[in-house]
Image (spheres, rainbow, N blue to C red):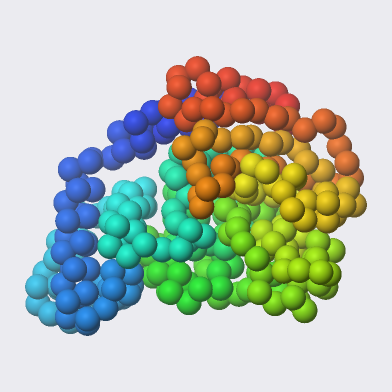
Amino acid sequence: MRLKAKLKSRLQDCGIIKAMKMEKIETAFGLLLTNVQELETRLATHFYDALIEQNVSYLGQAASADLQERNTQLRALKLTKQEWQKVYQFALIKGAKDMRLQANHQLTPDAIGYIINFMIETLSPETSLSMLELGSGTGNLAETLLTGMPDKTISYTGFEVDDLMIDLSASIADVMQTSAQFLQIDAVRPQVIEPVDLLLSDLPVGYYPDDAIAQRSLVGSQTEHTYAHHLLMAQGFKYLKSDGYAIFLAPSDLLSSPQADLLKKWLQDYASVAAVITLPEDIVTENHSKAIFVLQKSAQGKTPFVFPLTSLTNPEIVPTFMTQFRQNMI
């Protein structure tokens, strides 16, 4: 019940901010943004590169007295990890207005992060947990989860192929002093890592460009480019412990779209669909409506739990979902 109340408060008007001093967050954001904008001008670069440079200067020596003074003021605020996460989220939203990221690097909405947080705490009540995120992007989902589960000891690794996203997410984790580590890795290609307790991804949608690599996969098409999100699901399962769970944010038509037959054949042999949560219509990326798919690395199990989560703000729908999810998944 405590977990249920905690998530409900977070989903109401971004309720996590109620536990913080909003004025303090606004002050920190103002200081950070001023430094980033000064670095943009000084270095003749874009917002995200300037944000990385700001993170480096915060942890070391700033390039000017003004930058150093604002960093001193930032340190004096003594931000908690949760407060830093909100400051960086505001900064990333501001950056997206100045320099639009490709769709696969856009922020996972806060409310979805809190839903995934709830799912993880339900599925994995252990106090120690290893997690792998495929396509970790800006690291926002990672930090949302890590700051949302302070009572757990989490080993968190993110695989990301884009060098800008790696530098950005790693520099944010350094400032926040969280346990997340981010590695520049093409997650479709085989890697040698220890199996993890939980796999997750806000799956990047599109075609994988290397047909030779794709065709080695059980979900790889032999006649055309293969969907990258299908390849990531299949490859990611190789890093998951037996009976472990995977949580994927994916197009809602995942199991009926082109190449779905290849994916469903793989599912029959390697995974069971534990739950499908369809999301509100306003949660759309590149014209794709979204759903959360919970898979388990096991033989085919019971009938999947299916729930249409039509609103993330309705005071009745979210608690109903949470109650039914716990009843069906525990």
Is residue 306 or residue 299 the one in the foreground?
306
* Residue 49 drawn above or below residue 280: below
- Quadrant assignment, res 117: top right
Is residue 206 or residue 138 the one in the foreground?
206
Q: Is residue 280 left or right of residue 23?
A: right
Q: Is residue 21 left or right of residue 106?
A: left
Q: Is residue 99 left or right of residue 1?
A: left
Instruction: Please name the residue shown 17% across and 43% down the image.
Output: 23
Residue 217 appearing in the image:
no
Residue lying at the far top in this picture: please name it: 316
- Quadrant assignment, res 328: top right
- Quadrant assignment, res 160: bottom right
* Picture coordinates of residue 46, whole percent (x, y): 29, 73
Position of the N terminus by quadrant: top right
> Count the marks: how many?
0
Q: Is residue 33 left or right of residue 325?
A: left
Instruction: Please name the residue shown 17% across and 60% down the image.
Output: 31
Residue 107 appearing in the image:
yes
Instruction: Please name the residue shown 16% across and 51% down the image.
Output: 27
* Residue 16 drawn above or below residue 167: above
* Picture coordinates of residue 93, whole percent (x, y): 33, 54
* Picture coordinates of residue 221, whole percent (x, y): 80, 66
Instruction: Please name the residue shown 83% across and 69% down the image.
Output: 222
Position of the C terminus by quadrant: top right
* Picture coordinates of residue 98, whole percent (x, y): 28, 62
